Amino acid sequence: MDNKKEDGISMWRHPGGKLVEKGAHSLTDAELLAIIISTGTKGKSAEDIANEILNKFGSFQGMTNHPLSKFLQFKGLGEVKIVRIAAAFEIAKRIVERVIKDYER
């Protein structure tokens, strides 16, 4: 597992360990995005990249208003990672659309 116990406190090398132990609700936006990004680059973790993205765009909602090519500016993000982010956003969009549709009935 991704966590180690040190003096009774959990330590995670990746937010996935925190998700497993504490639940998705306990993660920050950057930690959730880091899970989708999966890996970083030399000297920059997936969470560092996620923080850079969120600082640039302000929020998940801010990220949705830009073309996928805009994400290539971030070192450590290539096509595969950008496609994963786009897919996750599309899943979220479809869930929201379905909830709204069900609510309007």
Image: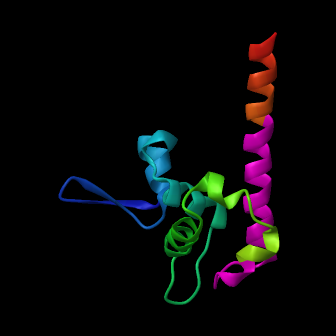
Q: What sort of colour scheme is used for the picture?
A: rainbow
Percent x, y of residue 99: 74, 24
Of residues 69 and 24, which is closer to you in this image?
69
Q: Which residue is farthest left?
A: 7
Q: Main secondary structure of the magenta part?
A: helix
Residue pictured at 67% horizontal, 60% vertical: 63
Of residues 81 and 69, which is closer to you in this image?
69
Residue 77 lies in what quarter of the image? bottom right
Whether residue 82 is in magenta: the answer is yes
The number of discs equals 0
Residue 101 left/right relative to 39: right
Percent x, y of residue 42: 55, 90
Percent x, y of residue 39: 61, 74
Residue pictured at 43% horizontal, 67% vertical: 13
Of residues 43 and 90, which is closer to you in this image?
90
Residue pictured at 58% horizontal, 78% vertical: 40
Residue 57 left/right relative to 72: left
Quadrant location of the C terminus in the rendered image: top right
Looking at the image, can residue 1 be seen? no
Whether residue 67 is in magenta: the answer is no
Of residues 56 and 48, which is closer to you in this image?
56
Looking at the image, can residue 82 be seen? yes
Residue pictured at 55% horizontal, 65% vertical: 54
Span of residues in magenta = 72-94
